[in-house]
Amino acid sequence: MKTSHYDRAHHAKKATGVGDPQCFKGEAGLAKFKVGDRVRIKDLPDLFYSRCQVYTRGAVGVVIVVVYESPAPEDEAWDNTDKSEWFYCVKFRQKDLWPEYPDLYANDTVETEFSERWLEKA
Amino acid sequence: MSDKPHEHKPAPMVDEVSDFEALEIAVRELAIEKGLFSAEDHRRWTEYVHTLGPLPAARLVAKAWLDPEYKKLAVTDGVKASLEVGVDWINSPPTGFGTPSDYCNLRVLEDTPKLKHVVVCTLCSCYPRPILGQSPEWYRTPNYRRRLVRWPRQVLAEFGLQLPPDIEIRVADSNQKTRYMVMPTRPAGTEGWSEEQLAEIVTRDCLIGVAVPKPGVKANAKRPVHPAVHPVHHDH
């Protein structure tokens, strides 16, 4: 009987000496958003795994860095690494995340990252 | 009841293995059995991680304070800037490609007189370990992680850092492959200091963003430990 062989070291082979996320560079094509774009975080289902915080869902922020290309954690958690996406660092006003945040500190902000699938133009 | 006076034994800090520790040991042993890595690999990795500390990051900040060109490099390419303080994110760890908790994408967050950064990982406890070493215990607690992102000023005040409202506090929530460290502003009273002198006042807490450097302060502030309101009683 022929046994199937799965190469568990494929990520190590790809990333050694290059780095992760550097090893996925050039795989995601054109970035849909650019620095300065206003984006809304989609409220997608996250049945199995996600790194998109619930507190950001539905909030509107501004892209401050287009950071790198990588498979999204929702895929990578299951070792589906053949489809990379652009990642964006998005800045939010605290007031837009927590309605009770005091007006006195209206300048305060939070920044965090999202893969492209979570963002829509706002 | 016994006549003997109650003997007061100090409760041990950790008196049992947590579920997560048991899970880690189980997964580790299965992985070794399956041949994904060897016990020797695991030992080497653990020993490597314990050699790391926050000194290179403190040097990076001190160097950037003195050299505007280096500061530009640190802010635009943290991984490249780390090389000059002896940290090779990509090649030096035993795996040679980082690990899921040490992805090779460092961003150095530059504070200004009107902007103060502070770092958290609300989802787990991501931390720039190659340049900062192991995270402090409080950084990993749900208490810090869930409160900092929502009540940053209150949490910073608990660390002894109270900032006026005109300073923007920016929380960086490290949720993907970027690791953050803070480059605080250079404090007054350090004019003419050497790189070594400057690096001494950039403590780990300054690099996470819960403190700001002060001349003469070379250690992290002691965290006060409050007694629990409803403490757990140990009968044994």
Image (tube, helix red, strand yellow):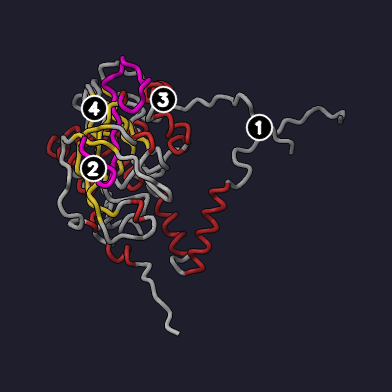
Residue B224 locus on image (x, y percent): 50, 25
Residue A62 locus on image (x, y percent): 21, 33
* Pick the front one: A40 or B34: A40
Mark 3 and mark 1 in contact? Answer it, CB < 8 Å. no
Say whether disc 3 or disc 1 marks the residue closer to the N-terminus. Answer: 3
Q: Nearer the viewer, mark 3 or mark 2?
A: 2
Point 17% across, 46% down: residue: A32
Amino acid at pointer 4: Thr
Q: Nearer the viewer, mark 4 or mark 1?
A: 1
Amino acid at pointer 3: Val
Is residue B38 at all visible to an observer of this figure? yes
SS for tag 4? Answer: loop
Is A20 situated left or right of A3 in this image? left
Q: Is residue A43 magenta?
A: no
| Quadrant of the image containing the C terminus of chain B | top right
Where does label 4 land, which residue? B185
Is B100 situated left or right of B84 in this image? right
Where does label 3 land, which residue? B155
Query: Is circle 3 on the same chain as circle 1?
Result: yes
